Amino acid sequence: MIRVAVADDQPLVRAGLRTLLQTEPDIEVVAVAEDGAEAVEQARALRPDVVCMDIRMPGRDGISATRELCGPDVADPIPVLVLTTFDIDDYVFGALEAGASGFLLKDADPDAIVAAVRSVAAGHGTLDTSLTRRVLREVVTRRRTQPVTAARGSELLTTRELDILLRLAEGMSNEEIAQALVLEVSAVKSHLARMMPKLGVKSRLQAAVWAYQSGLIER
C-alpha cells in the first residue's frame, strides 16, 4: 500500500486529490495539510511514501517544505511530488533543486497524477512532459556549479554506471535500460542505488538533471 500525504491550501483541491487517490486500491491518503508547516509536521510524524505538495501556500511555501523533507542535507528524506497550477520556470527549478522527485501540473489527466504518485513511491520520479524540454534547455544553459563535477563524476562512476546514467538521461525506464544493456532489471536498480549517493542525488530525476547540469552530456 502506498501511503500519501496531500498538502494544498485550497479545500476543494485537497478534497479532490484525496478522493482521486483514495479510489485506487493500492493508495491510502494518511494525512492532509493546509500549508507547508503542517505538511512537514505530518510527514515527519507519519512517514508517508509520497507527499503531494502544492507550491504557493500561506506561511511556509511548498518549496521550503520540500527542502525540509527531502533536501540535500536531509539524512532520511521523504519523497515529494510537487503538484501546482503554475509552470513558472523558477518554481520548476526551485522544486527540483529543493529535492522534489517529481513536478506535475494540477490540470494533468487524473490517470497521470495517479501514475506520478506510483512512480515517485517506486523511486523513479516524474516530470510533466510539457516541462521536460524546458528543464533540459535551462540546465544546459545555466550549468550551475554542482557538488560533483562531470569530470569527478566520471571518475567516481564505473563504466556500467555511466552507461546507465546516459540512458537514464534519455528518459529510459529501468526495463528499457536493462534491455538496451542486456541486464536484469534488478541489476539496473542495484547500479542506480550505488550511483546516486556518489553524485549527491536522491532520485532518478535528479540524476538525469545532474547529467545535463554537469555537462556530462549535451541536449
Image: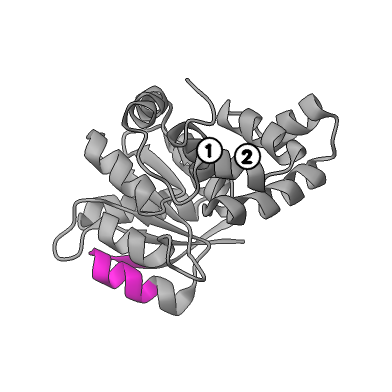
Residue 64 can be seen in this image: yes
Q: Is residue 89 above or below residue 61?
A: above
Instruction: Give the image's coloring scheme.
Output: one colour
- List the single residue furthest toward the top: 219
**Is most of the magenta stretch helix, strand or loop?**
helix
Secondary structure type for disc 1: helix
Residue annotated with mark 2: 154
- Taking the magenta stretch, the answer to whether it contains residue 216 is no
55 sits left or right of 151 in the view: left
The reply to whether dot 2 and dot 1 touch (C-beta < 8 Å) is yes
In the displayed structure image, the side of residue 20 where residue 161 appears, left or right: right
Side (left or right) of 99 relative to 58: right
10 Å crowding of disc 1: few (<14), some (14-19), many (20+): some
Residue 156's spot in the image, x, y percent? 65, 48
Q: Is residue 86 visible?
A: no
71 w.r.t. 217: above or below? below
How far from the left and from the top, in percent, is residue 11?
A: 22, 57
* Residue beneath disc 1: 150
Q: Which label belongs to residue 35?
A: none
Label 1 is placed on what type of residue? Ala
Whole-angstrom CA distance, mark 2 to mark 1, is: 6 Å
Residue drawn at x 58%, y 43% is 153
Residue 36 highlighted magenta (yes or no):
yes
Residue depicted at x 77% and y 25% = 180
Q: Nearer the viewer, residue 21 or 175?
A: 175
The image shows residue 96, relative to residue 176, as above or below, that is below
Name the residue type under label 2.
Ser
State the extent of the magenta-drawn residues as a range: 32-42
Residues 161 and 189: in front is 161
